[in-house]
Image (cartoon, helix red, strand yellow):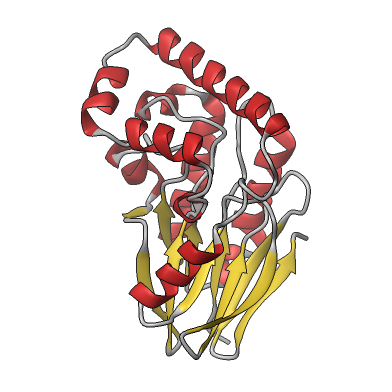
Amino acid sequence: MPHTLFISDLHLSPETPVATDMLLRFLRETAPAADSLYVLGDLFEYWIGDEGLAQPFAQEVAQAFRALEQDGTRVYFMHGNRDFLIGERFAAASGMKLLADPTVVDLYGTRTILMHGDTLCSDDLEYQKFRTMVRNPAWQQAFLAKPLDERVRMAREVRGRSEQSKQVKDMIIMDVTPATVDGAFRAHDYARLIHGHTHRPAHHEHKVDGHDCERWVLADWHERGSYLLCDANGCRAQPLG
């Protein structure tokens, strides 16, 4: 049966070869049977610009996606909070089409909102302030103008501060804000919603303005590795093989 696959939050880096190997196997063995594959952000732990393609592991990842695309599976990518600097050079190397966040697609007759998910966590004011800063084109231009080694150092520092911050934040703050989720359903005519970011894979049912809505949260691959498969019969989470 025709179907589409969704993944997110792999957080790949040279320091996580197991996760990279899991992805390469998934792209070889599972994804070729799908019509399309959507990567909804945080494919990489950090991305300091498309010069990152010089890293052998990044080249291997890009080539694996390119091979999948050339085999007939359409591949789409939406920026996450870790890899928002992925640009057209990486997209060309990997065969991916870059998507805006949010994007609405038709999945076998069901309108579906696709998001990374970080904008749904609107109660995390500290993170939202940071997100606004780094998504500013002027900030990105200034960052990309810095020497490569300085960018790597800055990315690692930000990652370290982020992990420290998680230790003291209320877990509720780091999850989606219910009113913001309701607003996303409302803004897109109560379509199905698929997102990642929170690392809390689940299927949620919502009642919004009298409408029955469903929300699928994708898994990260370090603890609960799985992917979402959607077809004409609906969506279901599948464990990685």
Number of numbered discs on residues: 0
Query: Seen in the image, is 170 located left or right of residue 54?
Result: right
Q: Nearer the viewer, residue 137 or 94?
A: 137
Q: Nearer the viewer, residue 169 or 158?
A: 169
Residue at point 65% right, 63% down? Answer: 227
Residue 71 visible (yes or no): no
Residue at point 43% right, 75% down? Answer: 185
Quarter of the image with the N terminus is: bottom right
Query: Is 211 located above or below residue 71 in the figure?
Result: below
Could you tell me residue 93's position as x and y percent? Answer: 37, 41
Residue 122 visible (yes or no): yes
Query: Seen in the image, is 8 located left or right of residue 89?
Result: right
Quarter of the image with the C terminus is: bottom right
Q: Nearer the viewer, residue 116 or 221?
A: 116
Which picture quadrant has residue 11? Answer: top right
Residue at point 51% right, 32% down? Answer: 58
Residue at point 36% right, 39% down? Answer: 90
Could you tell me residue 65's position as x and y percent? Answer: 48, 50
Could you tell me residue 30's position as x and y percent? Answer: 64, 64
Could you tell me residue 21's position as x and y percent? Answer: 69, 42
Q: Nearer the viewer, residue 70 or 145?
A: 145
Query: Seen in the image, is 210 located left or right of residue 144?
Result: right
